[in-house]
Image (cartoon, helix red, strand yellow):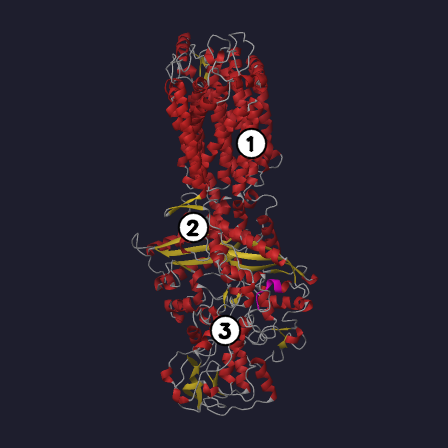
Amino acid sequence: MERGALLRGRLGFFAVTVLLLEVIFLVFSAKAQGSFSPSNATSGGVHREGYCSMYGICAQRSDGKFLNCASGSLSTKPDDLLSSKIQSLCPTITGNVCCSAAQFETLRDQVQQAVPLLVGCPACLRNFLNLFCELSCSPNQSLFINVTSTKQVNNTMTVNGIDYFITNTYGEKFYNSCKDVKFGSMNTRVMDFIGASAQNFRDFLAFLGRQAALNTPGSPYKIDFQTNAPLSSGMKPINSSVYSCGDSLLGCSCGDCSSSSTCSDSAPLDLLEKDSCKVAMGSASVKCVDFSLAVLYITAISALLLWGFLFRKRERGPVSEPEPFCKDSGDNELLSGYKQQNTNPPMHMSKWSILLKVLQPAIVQDFMARIFRKYGAFVSRKPTLVLSLSLAVPILLCIGLIRFRVETKPEKLWVGHGSKAAEEKRFFDYHLAPFYRIEQLVLATVPVSKNAMAPSIVTDQNMKLLFEIQKKVDTLHANYSGSMVSLADICLKPLADDCATQSVLQYFKMNQKRYDDYGGVQHAEYCFEHFSSEETCRSAFQAPLDPGTVLGGFSGSNYSDASAFIITYPVNNEAGDTGNQNGKAVAWERAFIRLVKEELVPLVEPQNLTLSFSSESSIQDELERESSADVLTILVSYLVMFAYISFAVGDSPQWPSFLVTSKVLLGLSGVFVVILSVLGSIGFYSAIGVKSTLIIMEVIPFLVLAVGVDNMCILVHAVKRQTTDISLEGKISNALVEVGPSITLASLSEVLAFAVGSFIPMPAVRIFSMFAALAVFLNFILQVTAFVALIIFDIRRTNDNRIDCFPCVKLAPSVGSERAILQRRPEFLVRYMEDFHAPMLAIPGVKIMVIAAFTAASFMSIALCTRLQPGLDQKIVLPRDSYLQGYFDDLAHYLRVGPPLYFVVKDFNYSLESNQTNKICSISQCDSNSLLNEITKASLIPESSFIAKPAASWLDDFLVWLSPEAFGCCRKFVNGSYCPPNDQFPCCQPNEGSCSIDGACKDCTTCFHQSDLYEGRPSTAQFKEKLPWFLKASPSANCAKGGSGTYSSSIDLTGFDSGMIQASSFRTYHKPLSGQMDYVNAMKAARDFSSRVSDSLKIQIFPYSVYYIFFEQYLNIWKTAWTLIAIGLGAVFIICLVITCSLWTSAMILLVLAMIVLDMMGVMAILKIQLNAISVVNLVMSIGIAVEFCVHITHAFLVSSGDRGSRAKAALCTMGASVFSGITLTKLVGVIVLSFAKSQVFVVYYFQMYLALVLIGFLHGLIFLPVLLSICGPPSRRVAEEKPEDQPTVSTE
């Protein structure tokens, strides 16, 4: 999960790569350029119907572009062949024309570049063709075309500039019909290419009217589109029809025209989250949950105050002599209330309590007491045998450690069996292609002051520095198995031999020589605005480069103000971890990181720049470093706990008796027992093939040590409370009878709480629960066997006055007598409990305040729980000094692109009969509720859909590619084989300056006539035959819809001949995501969207993004957390019920544990600790540890006699000191050391959460629980015991 969380930060630059890697090479520009200047109009020429403003081709420019003749002449009647050709392209032009055959062929060649982009929207295409058909061939050309500038070429006057008169309505309708048409392979709009992202018709026509420079696409003369013709000229704006994109005959799809009638008829997308319930309170509003909790709390407190008032009133009367809080019969004996028989209940005890005592005898407790007494006598006599046999079992289990393995693959840790995300990832990787590896640099400027804006990085100096950096990267070589690997060997090359590097240097073809040739920084700034349309701005790998993917730190489209360069190197990837290509990539990546650290960072720092960086393997490498970075901190934490244990179980440090009374050797022996239980658990599961995890290695030792230390302290303190005048056998038996049942209850509760977690599907949580349950169980067995035997040996050592840690050395008898005197003195914590703590909690006013405060905390925690956010911040799981810390900061600050999102269609039936083609596509005649139309509609509301762009569709492009209207795309030779576009080999020879229409492909014809298709769709046989052609067709200027490179990995053709495409994907992008909740909500929205569309279309569709597999756990993390908590609490309740045979007692323990867990979640919300697998494990663990704070006090309360108040005081005096010193302080000293960890994950999820657990458990166990027991505790459940031979009969549970 750590890696999965970290991966989230990298998804943004994944999107940067994908945005341009699968793009086509588009070369299109319109015929003309110019600016609107009516003052330049001339009155020369005849402007009447039937006259032309220009006719024929008179010359050529030096770059081969044809120039029209500037001659006002009558229109001419074309021959039948030319008339037929004109009608096929320009159906509005009939009769005479103003274009020759050569002119028409030039027109046809030029507009064919735009046809593939627009053919999916017939209205836009028709309007576009009509605009240039009327310009070139209209018989009334002179009425709306005026030649304003001529140029003499070869003694012939040629056209150099014209005015083209249109109406505002014409321009507006033309623009509106095309503004929303998609350019699928770029996930953008066609207007970005044919109109330079124009926002209105004037900008659109101004771009179309530009005059092309030499050797660049476009018109050889400029066009001024004007809306007002001179009144005296006889001219008038063009009167041609303009079709709306929603036209009934030429209407476009919903994806290309939001105003289409079919779009408005379709159901609207409803993905917006409903506002949460709120209660208005004046100008403010409060959540319904918070308001309800406040009302409930006020009601409860009012009832509590009323009870307090009545209770005080009832107590007024004769005041009897108060009984001492804690009776001491000397020499630290058991409390007299615990030791003496009390068969007569107090007079004020209710009849119901007496009835319960008679009807529900503590059968289990009585049985356990007898067992522990007999066992105590046995182990006292044969401690060596017990110690040997008890240690043999875990030692044998440790043999399994030879098969110890650690699972590190995130998908096997955090994704359960049958996970949708895992299955979808496997399907995607197998049928399509695994996602690319990413190497990235972020070069940024530094603000001159804290509040100042960072200066622009787009300067000549920084550009040259970037070239220097790129040169070092290009020349970097890494050794892999004896061969040298460079970036060129592993980089992604989608269309040509050049790497698809995403860098601002692509505007110079990654060639420093072209930097000055193109004009330096000015050329880059020009390309920021014309990247999609200008030939010189295209990348070395023949794709337009969106400046938003290579620049950062700018607002809007002010690219020149950018303060960061983002350089991304996409590298080929292979599924699995053993691929040879991946091995080469990893070797190069590690060399790349060394290069940046050792050379590039020192290079940029003197320039007042920062350089952050990352590679695909960086996360894994840093996590491995992090896993060992805090080993020392963890060891110190454990050592501090060891030291405290040794001190806590010993007597007061009084010299020289301390040499004998200290328990260092016993404490270390107990720690060894704890470690042995952990190793035994790991050994057992390793033997049966279950791999361990890092959480197990980090958490379980601490957990078992915490539980084990509690039991050790409680056992030692119980033995020390025995009188000195009884035998060793009597001490051990009485101590086990006193605390054995509560230790058993606590341990079995913990074991069951962890064991039920093994049914959770999340592997990391399930494996943790299995290991923890067995470790705690082994620890319990060893505590009551091996450690009890060790206590016996320690008592013998003490009785013989032998020095701790050096038992061979024996002191003089005088030290022993001094030790006996010290033993009879109560410890400080015992005195504190007797003299202050217990009396304070007995005050009625304090009780009310305690109940009110703890209830308020629980209610507040419930409210705060709703504010807990799922996720795991990627920066937390890294070392604080990791270079990735700054890198993730830069990504969050500079990146403007969201993660790529693929909608995958399974088992697409492309047969004509199935009609599934129309259910998926989004061009004309596709269903209005088709998959791609729905994606387009969703992209219009990214705030709720989290989809930013229309999808790149191989199906749309394929249907356009084979359409007869896209006459430059799907073509065939006379022999029926594939014929490429005229600007590709063999139609156009590489060494030719221009391509001739009379070359090798002069006889090529379109693959189909319109009559060959059924409503524009191919038959099953045609689809099967032509799809492989499409996927091999390279995009070019004459046909931008070729699928080679663009869609090579979008379709799985395995079994394609059967009429079924097993898998195909349609790529779009999430909107830029910030924060864990955005990633979770984006995944949920995509799944909801796919589910809805799948159900509607009856087609299998699922969304896929590379981060889904790591974030799927958060979709159900709340369910997982509540399930584990409920099961854990339920398990504890059942164990308590079985052992105590008291529903009352079990319910009270359950209540306190639930309050502790709720308070833990409230603290998590306050500290902004996110809900993830680590915190869920901690919450489950908190149930197990919190039991320790409750059951010992409750057990002591049960076996005490008297009224509830006196029994609560007795419980505190008996077990309070042990709980405080053996449970609270032991954990506290170990937890505090974790605050010095280098990794934030230890500080946040272990130090902060463990500290909160210790403090909350302490407060509930030693303050709230005694008060609650004194108010409504269960009746005493004492059972008579047989009298020990060394002392009077002891009453126990």
x 43%, y 77%: residue: 168
Badge 2: residue crowd in 10 Å (few <14, some 14–19, many ≥20): many
Which residue has dot 2 on it?
A: 888
For residue 857, side relative to residue 1275 (left or right) = left
Mark positioned earlier in the residue sequence (1 or 3): 3
SS assignment at label 3: loop
Spatial separation of the CA atoms under disc 2 and disc 1 = 42 Å
What is the three-letter code of the residue carrying label 1? Gly
1136 to 52, vertically: above or below: above
For residue 176, side relative to residue 1030 (left or right) = left
Badge 3: residue crowd in 10 Å (few <14, some 14–19, many ≥20): many
1029 to 768, vertically: above or below: below
The disc at residue 28 is 3
Spatial separation of the CA atoms under disc 1 and disc 3 = 70 Å
Closer to the camera in the image, 112 or 1165: 1165
Q: Nearer the viewer, mark 2 or mark 1?
A: 1
What is the three-letter code of the residue carrying label 3? Phe
- x and y, in percent, of residue 866 in the image: 46, 42
What is the three-letter code of the residue carrying label 2? Phe
- x and y, in percent, of residue 25 in the image: 52, 68
Mark positioned earlier in the residue sequence (2 or 1): 2
- x and y, in percent, of residue 611 in the image: 39, 54
Which residue has dot 1 on it?
A: 1130
Q: Write the start and end of the magenta stretch as one range.
A: 918-923
